[in-house]
Image: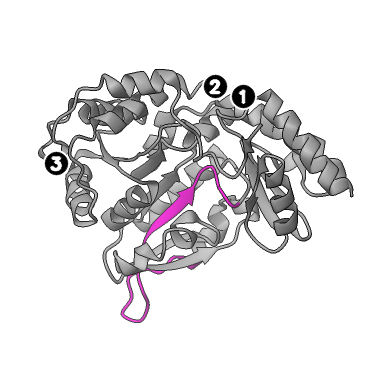
Amino acid sequence: MIVDLRSDTVTRPTPGMLEAMASAGVGDDVYGEDPSVNALEAEAAALFGKEAAVFTPTGSMANQIGLQLLVRPGEELLCDVKAHVVNFEMGAAAALGGISTRTWAGPNGRVDARLVEPLINRPNPYVTVTRAIAVENTHNIGGGTVQPIEELRRLRDLADAYGLGLHLDGARIWNAHAATGVPFDEYGRLFDTVSVCLSKGLGAPVGSLLITDAERAQRARVIRKRLGGGMRQAGFLAAAGRYALANHIDRLGEDHARARRLARSLEPFGICDAAQVETNIVLVRIPEIARVAAAAADQGVKISVLGADWGRMLTHLDVDDAGIEHAVKVLGTLLGK
């Protein structure tokens, strides 16, 4: 048995998804003629109560397009110190968008408008002007933290008071919705640009979307082409995304339950805090984690090593109850030595 807990990006298309991909209608998306892409973009935009969406090959591209729509070169973005947009996108905000960034540190990546406001620079000839704020929901390195909707509303009020844009890195917004029941269009109302990923918890093989208003979407297509993201017969991939939206959102609660079960089983070994597990991510602290991970992999259990003594495990649609039991047995034996 192979139980791959490194990420929810390792999923493979289900039989139903493969069938949808094989039967997809396609066209040239750069010309706007791919019916499957057009349908996916319309469905995603409607889900979030927005006017338009743009299909992108990766979540990093969707994020960077969103940031460039809100922040011009030489201006500033504020975000959490552990945010994906400044830690795991290869410096793209600066290298490709000319965007300066400053960060705040929230507990487990949780946003607090009171921490953000003191960082805002108004237009001034001596400082870099702040133009936008980015929020990650759920927060990856925070451990799958769900951003409280009340705090997001306060952040929207703060942004409006200072004339700032708001970008949502919603790669795992599906998990936030599953955990809280907050409607997707509620998130859409609060943010100017929203990126969502189809290839994590939803299990599509490739693809993300940048969701926004119609005017920004037109500019987004220009930036996407500039970044090398103009795809041709992308409908085969879009069909997987449409299938995921229709079939894989409601089942995310199963992943969350399995993550909690995994954390509760491993908590007695002192490596994690089950109370901190809100969605499908379990952060662990293990001395010599690289050695433990290698030994676990030899027995079919793969975990992600993020540092000298810490890592993470993610549940997803390719991990069932038997997989969780096997992972607990293997890791428990290794940690018990």
Sequence-earlier tag: 1 or 3: 3
Alpha carbons under labels 3 and 2: distance apart: 33 Å
Please name the residue that numbered disc 3 is placed on: 30
- Residue 86 numbered tag: none
Q: Residue at x 35, y 39 (%)?
A: 207
> Mark 2 packing: few (<14 Cα in 10 Å), some, or many (20+)?
some
Q: Quadrant of the N terminus?
A: top right
Single out the residue that lies furthest toward the bottom. 126
Q: Which residues are magenta?
A: 118-141
Q: Residue at x 24, y 30 (%)?
A: 235
Kindly identify the amino acid type of the residue bearing the numbered disc 2. Answer: Arg
Please name the residue that numbered disc 2 is placed on: 251
Kindly identify the amino acid type of the residue bearing the numbered disc 3. Answer: Val
- The location of residue 199, given as percent across then percent down, is 43, 37
- For residue 82, above or below residue 44: below
Under circle 3, the secondary element is helix
- The location of residue 240, given as percent across then percent down, is 35, 27
Under circle 1, the secondary element is helix
- Queried whether the magenta region covers residue 139, the answer comes back as yes
Query: Residues at badges 1 and 2 in contact (C-beta under 8 Å)?
Result: yes
Single out the residue that lies furthest toward the front. 298
Can you see residue 16? yes
State which quadrant residue 147 falls in. Answer: top right
Question: In this orientation, which residue lies closer to the viewer: 134 or 173?
Answer: 173
Alpha carbons under labels 1 and 3: distance apart: 37 Å
- Queried whether the magenta region covers residue 284, the answer comes back as no
Under circle 2, the secondary element is loop
Sequence-earlier tag: 3 or 2: 3
Q: How many circles with numbers are drawn on the protein?
A: 3
- For residue 130, above or below residue 70: below
Alpha carbons under labels 1 and 2: distance apart: 6 Å
Please name the residue that numbered disc 1 is placed on: 254
